Amino acid sequence: DAMVIQNPRYQVTQFGKPVTLSCSQTLNHNVMYWYQQKSSQAPKLLFHYYDKDFNNEADTPDNFQSRRPNTSFCFLDIRSPGLGDAAMYLCATSRDLGGGNIQYFGAGTRLSVL
Amino acid sequence: RKEVEQDPGPFNVPEGATVAFNCTYSNSASQSFFWYRQDCRKEPKLLMSVYSSGNEDGRFTAQLNRASQYISLLIRDSKLSDSATYLCVVTLYNNNDMRFGAGTRLTVKP
């Protein structure tokens, strides 16, 4: 059974129209992450939550926001999607912080911007 | 210089071949190392952690050379199902940032 669930799998939005991607987990992990992965590139970390503490990567555009209303759910909000934001968005979780903690990924949401 | 560098491939090999992937990392303070596998249009999945002493899991062997800041993955007796992109991942011990390489694409052919 999937432990990190992302919805929807495919999302199409219009240029400039806000969009929200959803992630939920059944692992009760403390940490949830959002990555952006473009074709043939490495996943790029956007931000992560440790419990309710939000940690933004320095180079994540302001256009990307996140919410974690409870342990199980985390949302990625793209306020004004541009064509360059079309990508696969991956959610991941880990039990805790620290290099030894393995991250478990959801199946991703593929975002298209028209 | 990228933090984690991999040969992008693609590597096209026949079934049964042995294939090796290399990865170098730039931050000497890196402490944890992993190989992830990513199938086309799917999420990365952990293949194996890489330990200083090296480790083996069936047909897969991972090696770490801290002095050279280099990690390797060896796949013996390749199967068609091994076709995927293999991502090298590096983290600092107290920093949860996982830095991914761009991946090496492997295609195993009959």
Image (cartoon, coloured by chain):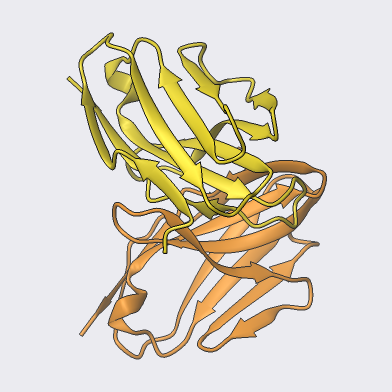
| Residue A60 coordinates in the image, percent (x, y) | 54, 20
| Residue A83 coordinates in the image, percent (x, y) | 27, 18
Quadrant of the image for the N terminus of chain A? bottom left
From what the image shows, is residue B43 above or below residue A111?
Answer: below
Q: Which residue is drawn at 38% across and 30% down?
A: A21
From what the image shows, is residue B1 above or below residue A25?
Answer: above
Closer-to-camera residue (A79/B50): A79
| Residue A9 coordinates in the image, percent (x, y) | 28, 42
Closer-to-camera residue (B62/B46): B46
Say whether residue B88 is visible: yes
What is the total number of numbered labels drawn onto the structure image? 0
On the image, which quarter does residue B70 sit in? bottom right
Quadrant of the image for the C terminus of chain A? top left
On the image, which quarter does residue B42 sit in? bottom left
| Residue A10 coordinates in the image, percent (x, y) | 24, 38
Q: The orange chain is which one?
A: B
Relative horizontal placement of residue B55, taking residue B77 as reference (left or right):
right
Relative horizontal placement of residue B95, taking residue A14 as reference (left or right):
right
Say whether residue B69 is visible: no
Relative horizontal placement of residue B25, taking residue A98 as reference (left or right):
left
Q: Residue at x 28, y 80 (%)?
A: B80
Tint of chain A? yellow
Q: Which residue is drawn at 70% across and 35% down?
A: A51
From what the image shows, is residue B9 above or below residue A70?
Answer: below
| Residue reaching furthest to the left | A114
Q: Residue at x 78, y 62 (%)?
A: B66
